[in-house]
Each structure stands twice: as structure tokens, then as C-alpha cells.
């Protein structure tokens, strides 16, 4: 498992306000050249669409509804409101300024820290990177992955697939990306991570 060099890291009680969930994709294309010694590097980088440095995500909390053949619509039970005790049991993960040193090609799964979710409900998750447009590495996408700390299973993106818990749930947060090319000494700068 890869590790992050921490900047300032702190935890606080999770905030209750819901943040709109936005699915963000990042795609980069490159023309490759073979250099002396057989190392491949991108000769030119091209961006398909806008490259965001901020990925806002979370579990989909929309109430799913279905309609039967007679046109009758039924919907799932809405999520319960969090009580004061639920909120008191939660602890957010907040990281300000961190660095991920790049030292190999392929998949990275960088442990960022642990968060305690009230009843297992993700209110919001934010990942901000400082140098996604870097000339020193090529990684076509980044994502913030949440995994149950006990079962080590990645959380589904929909709360109705995941379900809620009777009490607090410990969750590990990871930065996940696939590195296709990098220069010696390159690193990814993390401006902010917030999960609650």
C-alpha cells in the first residue's frame, strides 16, 4: 500500500449539511515516443475536456422509485434523519496539504486516513489536487475510494445498495489512480481531502 506524506491533518466532528454529489471524470490523451534506453514518455499531452483539480463525490442518496405495469410508482424509504447522538459519534477526515511521491508505474492506492461515519452515511467527500496538469507525470484519472475498515470492502456508490448501520462505521479513505508515466522525483500534491 502506498502512503502519503502528510501536511496538516486534523479530524473534527462531521458536518451534517448535505453536499450535492457530482460525478467528475478526468481524461488525458498522450502521444508516446521511445527514448534512448527504451523508456517511454509522452511527447505531447492533450486534454479531452476540462481537467478538474477538485473531485466532489459521495454516496448517491437519491430515493430510488420504480413504476409497475399499471403506472403505480413505489419508492424506497427515505434515509433516517441523524440524531444529535449520531452526529456526536462521527469524526471527519480532513487533510490540508499532502504529497504523494511517485516511484513506480501502474496502480496506486494511497491510504489517506480513517473517518467515522454517523450510521454509515457519507454526507460529503471532497478531493482537491494541486497539480493535475503537471508536466512531470501522466495519470488519466483520480478517485477517492472509501472502504469499510472491518470488512475491507469498498463502499457501493449508492446508499440503498450499501445500507445504513445501527451505529458509527469506521471507513478508510484512499486516493486511487493509475500512473502511466512519470519523471524521477515527481509527486502529486494534495490540496485538501474532506470526508464526513
Image (cartoon, helix red, strand yellow):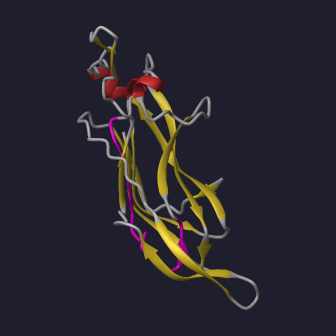
Please give left or right for residue 69 compared with residue 3 in the image. left
As for residue 189 lying within the magenta part, the answer is no
Q: Is residue 89 above or below residue 181?
A: above
Q: Give the residues drawn in magenta, as a range.
A: 123-139
Q: Is residue 50 above or below residue 81?
A: below
Pinpoint residue 132: horizontal percent, then vertical percent: 43, 69
Residue at point 36%, 34% (across, down): 60
Q: Residue furthest right?
A: 37
Q: Is residue 144 above or below residue 163?
A: below
Pinpoint residue 114: horizontal percent, then vertical percent: 49, 42
Pinpoint residue 120: horizontal percent, then vertical percent: 43, 27
Residue at point 69%, 89% (across, down): 35
Which of 102/12 is in front?
102
Q: Residue furthest bottom?
A: 36
Q: Residue furthest front?
A: 69
Residue at point 29%, 8% (across, down): 70
Q: Is residue 134 visible?
A: no
Pinpoint residue 38: horizontal percent, then vertical percent: 75, 84
Please give left or right for residue 36 compared with residue 194 in the image. right
Which of 57/99 is in front?
57
Q: Is residue 10 above or below residue 168?
A: below
Amino acid at each position: 500500500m502506498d502512503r502519503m506524506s502528510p501536511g496538516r491533518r486534523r479530524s473534527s466532528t462531521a458536518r451534517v449539511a448535505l453536499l450535492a454529489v457530482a460525478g467528475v471524470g478526468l481524461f488525458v490523451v498522450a502521444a508516446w515516443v521511445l527514448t534512448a534506453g527504451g523508456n517511454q514518455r509522452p511527447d505531447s499531452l492533450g486534454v479531452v475536456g476540462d481537467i478538474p483539480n477538485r473531485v466532489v463525490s459521495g454516496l448517491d442518496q437519491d430515493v430510488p422509485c420504480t413504476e409497475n405495469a399499471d403506472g403505480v410508482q413505489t419508492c424506497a424509504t427515505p434515509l433516517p434523519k441523524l440524531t444529535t447522538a449520531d452526529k456526536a459519534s462521527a469524526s471527519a477526515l480532513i487533510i490540508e496539504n499532502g504529497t504523494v511521491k511517485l516511484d513506480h508505474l501502474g496502480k496506486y492506492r494511497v491510504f489517506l486516513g480513517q473517518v467515522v461515519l454517523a450510521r454509515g452515511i457519507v454526507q460529503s467527500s471532497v478531493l482537491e489536487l494541486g497539480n493535475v496538469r503537471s508536466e512531470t507525470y501522466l495519470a488519466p484519472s483520480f478517485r477517492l475510494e472509501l472502504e469499510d475498515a472491518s470488512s475491507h470492502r469498498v463502499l457501493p456508490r449508492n446508499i440503498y445498495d450499501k445500507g445504513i448501520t445501527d451505529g458509527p462505521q469506521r471507513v478508510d479513505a484512499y486516493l486511487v489512480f493509475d500512473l502511466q508515466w512519470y519523471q524521477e522525483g515527481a509527486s502529486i500534491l494534495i490540496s485538501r481531502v474532506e470526508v464526513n
